[in-house]
Amino acid sequence: MNDLATPSTMHALVYKGPGKPVFERHARPAITAPGDAIVRVTRTTICGTDLHILKGDLPSCTPGRILGHEGVGVIESVGAAVTTFKPGDHVLISCVSACGRCEYCRRGMYSHCTTGGWILGNTIDGTQAEFVRIPHADTSLYPIPAGVDEEALVLLSDILPTGFECGVLNGKVAPGATLAIVGAGPIGLAALLTAQFYSPGMIIMIDLDDKRLAVAMTFGATHTINSGDGKAVAALMALTDNKGVDTAIEAVGIPATFELCEQIVAAGGIIANIGVHGLPVALHLERLWDRNIAITTRLVDTSSTPMLLKVLKAGKIDAKKLITHRFKLDAILEAYETFGDAAKTGALKVIIEA
Ligand SMILES: NC(=O)c1ccc[n+]([C@@H]2O[C@H](COP(=O)([O-])OP(=O)(O)OC[C@H]3O[C@@H](n4cnc5c(N)ncnc54)[C@H](O)[C@@H]3O)[C@@H](O)[C@H]2O)c1
Ligand SMILES: [Zn+2]
Ligand SMILES: [Zn+2]
């Protein structure tokens, strides 16, 4: 850290190219449009997507970018057009910025906002810093209700709406129905927590990692299958009277797990894809054409955030169970190492206190 620091600079985690995260002094953000707010970040976290960026998988994020698209904080200043928030307000930052006015926003499809969408920590500087500029602040920030735990709220920026919207809502999870979730990472576990709003009869978690499967059992899974032996389909069919599942949620993002969903979906069922895919996947229509199934894809819109805020406030889900580690902002590189080596460290979500 630099002792000669002036108030015009701050600490931030900056992407300097593949494999190069650097924690350094950086210029503080300033208001550049009337709809902007500057937020002093109090808590943020790291997402699997940040690891994708660091691997060089997302060319939209260029070197020099401050990473991070999740967090909570306090409003520092607002542009002239911001009417909902004022300095001092406690806010939740959505990973998706939304103008609220374009044709996609008017349909609630904020992820495709023509001047927003997922831009934070991607095409504009993000939340892994002391301060962040939030465009379209009125429609991209949420007031934090009094008495709600700040740490749990960090999980509302991205992973809870993602698991719920892309997995549970798109997968039409129904009372008494059978559900399989492939991938027991933070996103699959968020789908597991929020699927229980609808009381499915059976929730089967599938992963390669026995530690994560054990966590899934404590989160409400009824059965787990370790697919490492290549016999997951047979194991699942044995559990479901050879029918397969009504909803198969894909929460990994590789061809093998999507094709597993194709094999385990029941007649009339839905495959709800959440995973970010970098490779083509085979669609076995020779097997599926007569099965009356549907396949959905979605980039999280965060349109469910107001509802999820109420659920957290009411204590209806214990989202904090997803938090396994805590770090100060100046130890963020250590946080990245812990999060990046989840198989060894058992990390799910790491909280970073700014
Ligand atoms: N659609 C969206 O808007 C959106 C938003 C956020 C994240 N995502 C994506 O969701 C996916 C999951 O995110 P995450 O943070 O939970 O990731 P993660 O890497 O932490 O978890 C993935 C899990 O899949 C398991 N896995 C890997 N290969 C497997 C296999 N062959 N069979 C069974 N399990 C296997 C891993 O053990 C791990 O537990 C990622 O692709 C992420 O990019 C999508
Ligand atoms: Zn994310
Ligand atoms: Zn818009």
Image (tube, rainbow, N blue to C red):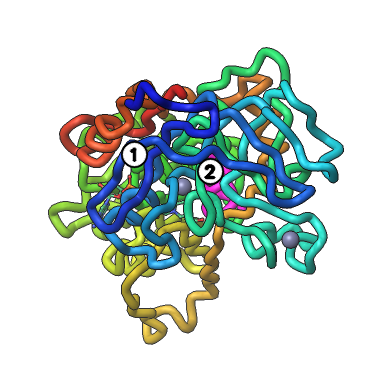
Q: Main secondary structure of the magenta part?
A: helix
Quarter in which the N terminus is drawn:
top left
Q: Quadrant of residue 11?
A: top left
- SS type, badge 1: strand
How many numbered tags mark residues here? 2
Q: Is mark 2 within 8 Å of ligand 2?
A: yes
Residue at horizontal 51 percent and vertical 59 percent from the top? 123
Residue extent of the magenta highlight: 160-169
Number of other residues with Cα within 10 Å of mark 2, as a class: few under 14, some 14 to 19, many 20 or more: many
User: What residue is disc 1 on?
Assistant: 223
Residue at horizontal 20 percent and vertical 39 percent from the top? 341
Rendered position, 90 above or below 168: above
Q: x and y percent of residue 84 in the render?
A: 83, 35
Q: Is residue 153 visible?
A: yes
Q: x and y percent of residue 337 in the render?
A: 23, 36
Q: Is residue 243 visible?
A: no
User: What residue is disc 2 on?
Assistant: 158
Q: Which mark is residue 133?
A: none
How far separated are the C-alphas under marks 1 and 2?
Answer: 26 Å
Rendered position, 111 above or below 347: below
- Residue lying furthest left in this view? 229
Q: State the residue in front, 63 or 173.
A: 63
